[in-house]
Image (tube, helix red, strand yellow):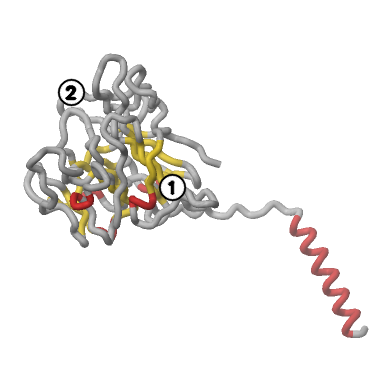
Amino acid sequence: MSKSKALIIFLATLVNACAVESDAEPPDLPVVLLMPKGNILIEEVYYSGAVPTAGIDRYYSDQFIEVMNVADAPVKVGGLIIGDAPGISGEINFSDTPGGPYVNDPDYVYLSTAWRIPGEPEDVLLEPGESLVIAQDAATHNPYSPVNLLNADFETYVDEFGADFDDAIVPNLENLWYTGGADWLVTVFGPTIIVLSMDGDKLEQAGGEYDPVRAPVSAVVDTMEALKDGQSGDYKRLHDSVDSGFVHVSGTYTGESVRRVRDDSGQLVDTDDSGADFEVSVPNPGLSVD
């Protein structure tokens, strides 16, 4: 038999084998589960408060934070920590000045309040392209606000004072560190939101009983820094190496949120500059974008 004929017979046999193999059921491959860092981004933060209506001049129980899985595989978000940084947002009172011991630290980020998604990392999975909505209060908020958070994934609940609303269905975040009042209110003048991936027990007290806790910059998953207005840059809380810019809405109780910008391909933009990565929007928790 010639070498060329033998090669033809071999190739034909290989093709037939591949055809038979293609009819077989593919083996079940293990699902790769990712950690949050590099895969979870803050998609939207609504903090400004609702436009006054229904006879009240301020309403902020409709605040929420939304984070998204931007990876191509499920992300383990059990134990993910979310909180807000200390420090004022700008010159709100005449005597206000920027600075303080808990701002612009290149090595640590500080949190006045720290909440944790309950469970072990693999207990809560976020599928690709899906988001988690974390409500201050999981409710419809009608008639004081058009924002409906009844279907939020989690809510924050402060039980110490007995004045917070607790939805019977939406699960609560675990309270790791809290220095606020009867309800978790991030400042309507512009908060700094920080997402961490680390053991909650390793948060360090930065001072006394009512001072913030701190975490190494290496634990940061994402941040969103908002200030009072465009002239408030001196009041930045985060070091430029963590977040080099800031965003702001037009004022308090304007019903405005900040939403992460998308590029031409529809992907969330992440340049570690909140001024470039976020834009003013209308709050829409759980918004699906194809």
* Picture layout, residue 135 above or below residue 27: above
Quarter of the figure that contains the C terminus:
top right
Mark 1: amino acid: Val
Marker disc for residue 261 = 1
Horizontal and vertical percent position of residue 108: 20, 57
* Residue 131 rendering spot, x and y as whole percentages: 44, 41
Image quarter of residue 3: bottom right
Residue for badge 2: 162
Dot 2 surroundings within 10 Å: few (below 14), some, or many (20 or more)? few
SS at badge 2? loop
Q: Residue 268 location, x and y as percent?
A: 45, 50
Residue at the location (25% across, 18% down)? 56
User: Residue farthest to the right?
Assistant: 1
Number of the front mark, 2 or 1: 1
Tags 2 and 1 in contact by the CB under 8 Å rule?
A: no
Q: Residues within 10 Å of mark 1 (few under 14, many from 20)?
A: some
Is 57 above or below relative to 193?
A: above
Residue at 41% in and 48% down:
76
In primary-sequence order, the first of circles 2 and 1 is 2
Whether residue 189 sits left or right of residue 42 in the image: it is left
Given the image, on which type of amino acid does mark 2 rest? Gly
In this picture, residue 116 sits left or right of residue 234:
right
